[in-house]
Image: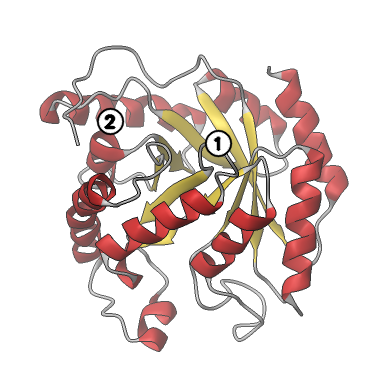
């Protein structure tokens, strides 16, 4: 991949606000619930759909119904026509980096429908110990998992450059997390989107760290798009928008979606554009 050189202000604010919805797989009795929700959310006008990359529920019944992330995303690629989609976020430790690249490229093509693909490669180092233990992956430490992510990202980019056929577009990379020594350096080197949970007040300092790493490593961070979760607080969302955030994602349980709440956030999105 060509080296990028930091050339201007960031984050990128010359794009409209977008609304994402993360379908969190709690107590799914059947996949038909997911399929119906994906269809309804695309029809409503949601911009991005996410799932998550875990093997067990993070809340509720510990052994509740659950589905694997990447195979589900391939189904979304075929089912949908307009929305972008991905995992929020993929766990780097669960799959070989070159395999991740090939899976992403394949899903990108499935979703293209005659144009460019719509897949967003969201990734992180992983943290849910039960996933690792139950499926036989070494949990290691926070540091070792982050080091593995740092080693994987260049391999993924290199594999995208070798694949035949190539991806339909430069697959956007979303990196989640806010650690200043490693994660934000990876953001500066590789990310198109930075997803975090930081407050509007923290955001300014974190962006300074990303700029610093961009300068140190000679990478352009001027096109970075800020992404965050939203709850019920539009005042905080307003402040994050003013600070430069442009992708706002609402987490919902697929079997109990309040579409009126989602419509309210769509109206809020439209008020910003």
Residue 145: x and y, percent? 25, 64
What residue is disc 1 on? 115
Q: Is residue 7 above or below residue 157?
A: above
User: Which quarter of the figure is the C terminus placed in?
Assistant: top right
Residue drawn 20% across and 53% down?
A: 155
Residue drawn 71% across and 40% down?
A: 46
What is the number of the mark on residue 208? none
What is the number of the mark on residue 210? 2
Q: Nearer the viewer, residue 164 or 31?
A: 164
Residue drawn 41% across and 39% down?
A: 172
Visible residue check, residue 13:
yes
Q: Quadrant of residue 114?
A: top right
Q: Residues within 10 Å of mark 1 (few under 14, many from 20)?
A: few
Alpha carbons under labels 1 and 2: distance apart: 33 Å
Residue 93: x and y, percent? 30, 68
Circle 2 — which element? helix
């Amino acid at each position: 991949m060509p080296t990028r050189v930091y050339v201007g202000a960031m984050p990128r604010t010359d794009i409209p606000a977008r609304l994402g919805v993360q379908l969190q797989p709690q107590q799914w009795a059947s996949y038909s619930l997911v399929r119906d929700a994906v269809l309804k959310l695309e029809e409503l006008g949601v911009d991005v759909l996410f799932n998550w990359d875990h093997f067990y529920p993070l809340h509720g019944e510990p052994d509740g119904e659950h589905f694997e992330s990447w195979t589900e995303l391939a189904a979304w690629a075929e089912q949908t026509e307009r929305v972008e989609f991905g995992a929020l976020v993929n766990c780097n430790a669960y799959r070989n980096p070159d395999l991740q690249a090939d899976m992403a490229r394949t899903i990108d093509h499935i979703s293209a429908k005659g144009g460019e693909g719509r897949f967003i490669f969201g990734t992180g180092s992983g943290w849910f110990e039960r996933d690792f233990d139950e499926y036989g992956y070494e949990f290691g430490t926070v540091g070792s998992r982050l080091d593995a992510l740092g080693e994987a990202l260049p391999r993924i980019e290199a594999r995208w450059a070798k694949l035949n056929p190539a991806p339909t577009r430069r697959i956007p990379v979303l990196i989640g997390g806010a650690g200043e020594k490693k994660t934000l350096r990876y953001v500066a080197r590789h990310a198109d989107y930075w997803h975090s949970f930081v407050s509007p007040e923290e955001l300014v300092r974190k962006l300074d760290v990303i700029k610093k790493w961009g300068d140190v490593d000679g990478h352009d961070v001027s096109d970075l798009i800020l992404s965050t979760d939203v709850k019920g607080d539009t005042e905080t969302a307003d402040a994050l928008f003013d600070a430069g955030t442009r992708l706002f994602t609402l987490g919902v349980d697929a079997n109990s979606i309040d579409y009126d709440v989602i419509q309210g956030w769509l109206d809020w999105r439209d008020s910003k554009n």
